[in-house]
Image (cartoon, coloured by chain):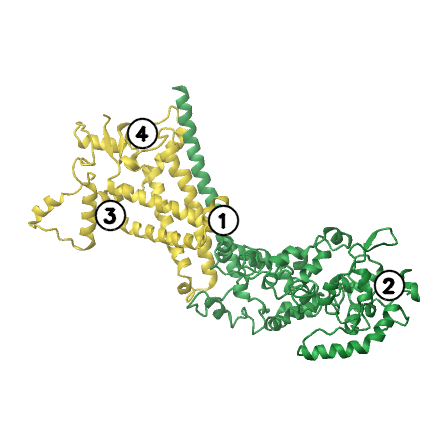
Chain colours: A green, B yellow
Amino acid sequence: MKWRKDGSKGWRILRGGLPVFLIFGLMLGLMLGGTARVAWSDNSLCFGCHQDESLKKQDSRGKSLSLFVSEAVFKNSAHKKLSCSDCHTRIKDDKHAEGGQKAADKRVNCAPCHEKAEKEYLQGLHSKMIMKGAERAANCFDCHGKHNILPSKNNKSMTHVSNVDKTCNRCHADAVFVKEHALGAAIPKEEFKESVHGRTGEITCTNCHGSHSLRSLIDPKSQIFRSNIPQTCGSCHPDITKQFRESVHGVLAARGRSDSPTCTTCHGFHGIKTKADPNSPVHERRIAKTTCPQCHAAERISREYRITTVPVKSYYDTFHGLSYQGGDTFSANCASCHGVHDIRPSSDPKSMIHKDNLQKTCGNCHPGASENFAKGKMHAIASISGEDFGEKVVGWVRVVYIILIVMVIGGLTFFNFTDWLRKTIERRHR
Amino acid sequence: MTKKYLRMTLNERIQHLNLAVNFTLLVITGFALSFPTAFWVSPITDVPMGMTFRGFLHRLCGVAVVFLSGYHILYLAFTERGRGIARDMIPGLKDAKDLWETLKNNLYINRPAKLIKMPRFNFREKLEYLGLIWGTIVMTVTGFILWFKTEWLQFFPMWTWDVARAIHFYEAILATLTIIVWHFYSVVFNPDIYPMSWAWITGDLTEHEMEEEHGLELEKIKAQQGGELKEFGEEAAVGGGRIYPARRERDEQGGRKAPSPRGFYGIVRGFNETIKNWKGT
């Protein structure tokens, strides 16, 4: 901590009165059982001027700037024991310079006390933006406040868990700010408010994004960097992350496949909802409609990784898929057979769709399913040129039936048309 | 009052209505599964549990049609009128000739048009009835395979179930289109019939309708009546009398007082009798 070197009037008085104050304060403290506030420093000289609400100055751009500091607020803050000059180490101003040296920097520096936070902050995105010259990048006081700083456990603090979103949203819910900083149209405020995390009131922005060390999405050390997401979510959902890491998606994601899904690919991010919520992407009505097909029916991904779009197509043509499309929630969707977080390839003996486990998987819904029940090609597409025998037979049945329908219905229609024509013509002549 | 000829007894009309209702429900609930996103399916899909209820209703109607078919077989076998229907329904060479001549009439190949006298069930009706039998058998067999998949798949590989599903679907299209194209032309859109043949409600045909569609049968009836035509009601059915003796008469003949139903045969006969003699409440 830097103490003022100059011998201003206030300082001299303070120094002279300090022992008296200490003794008096100690006595007072003992009298009140040690709970009384002990004034370690006397800021009365500063407040003598700065308590005036009309105190103003013109900044370099000619803008009027209030210099009012509420003593009551400061006395309630976490820094109430500090002297003004503890933080305002250098005040570059003619008025304050009467008795001494002009300071080079008027900015308050928190680092001397808060070394760890400073170190983290300097690695984070906000400090980098400041270094780049961004005007509205968050400094310490942007999030923590100035004279009114409260410990973050205090529910009135700007950094209390219930207030963090408001603090962040002062910039990040501002459409102009979002546009200027190329954050897309992402204003997470509304989505998060409705999300399952937002509703608990215990989870807030900093839980996933980090606080002082908050980093950019493209920073590999960021908590929200693609491959770190399972770990970030796993800090609260460790079992699920463990399952996911062993799944086919988790393995590929760990190898750096940018197309392999992580938690957020299926669950969304700011607007994560419970699976019981119909608006959730993992609601049973949406799993097989949008969530899995977003990759498994996508042309680029399916071509790139040679996963065909056949499973999705053929599913929609089965009883399960058709009934599902009509809103039947008893009907199997992707997750019913393939699992949820622990989806494994069929070659994996632990997979729900491994040939040894199929009877059990089918038996979940079809009690009494025999060993024979699931033997055969599952995602079959009927075609006379199909690979599977069953596909071929069904393909031929279709061809024969279509020919039959066209011939029979065509014949009947032709016969009736001639009948109608004759009867109509006869009527005309009558 | 025009002369009327009994076409369908009340029993037969109820059978027809039963089939019509169940068939329509089967078509709607069945194609609702095949085309779940079609606009007309929304009343089913918008309701919670709609698809589940759809499946239940489809199976219920299927069972109803199976029972109706069973009843119909018993009706054909064990009533005199039923046996007559079965006999008259057998297709013969004459039906093929009738069809061919009708086509030639229609295409103005026969000039002037030949007068065709058709029997009690003309070729249109025979074709449709036999098609109905075929369709019912196919749909029943495949339907039960689809329903009892667990049992079926104990003995047969999965592709057989897929085949049954394909057949059930395409046969349904065939059956539905046949009803729309063939049956609805016969009883609604035929210019001679339009707006509708009332036989399925009133149970009888006019003499004009008999001449047009069943000339041979009309001659036969007239011959039996000895040229003396009376007004026909339900009591005076084809053949000029009751189809079988009334219960009272039967009891008297058999020397019995109380009716003794001998198995299902008696029940069917009794049921027929009751319906036939029903005069309204």
Residue bearing mark 3 = B75
Categorize mark 1 by other alpha carbons within 10 Å: few (<14), some (14-19), many (20+): some
Instruction: Name the residue nearer the viewer: B60 or B125.
Output: B60
Camera-nearest label, 4 or 1: 1
- Label 4 vs label 1: CA separation? 41 Å
Residue bearing mark 4 = B212
Mark 4 belongs to which subunit? B
Q: Amino acid at mark 3?
A: Tyr
Q: Residue at (64%, 72%) from the top-left corner?
A: A235
Instruction: Name the residue nearer the viewer: B14 or A212.
Output: A212
- In the image, are marks 4 and 1 on the same chain? yes
- Label 3 vs label 4: CA separation? 28 Å
Locate residue B231, reporting x and y percent. Answer: 19, 29
Mark seen at residue A106: 2
Q: Is residue A175 above or below residue A363?
A: above
Quarter of the image where one finds residue A213 = bottom right
Question: Dot 2 lies on which element?
Answer: loop
Q: Quadrant of the C terminus of chain B?
A: top left
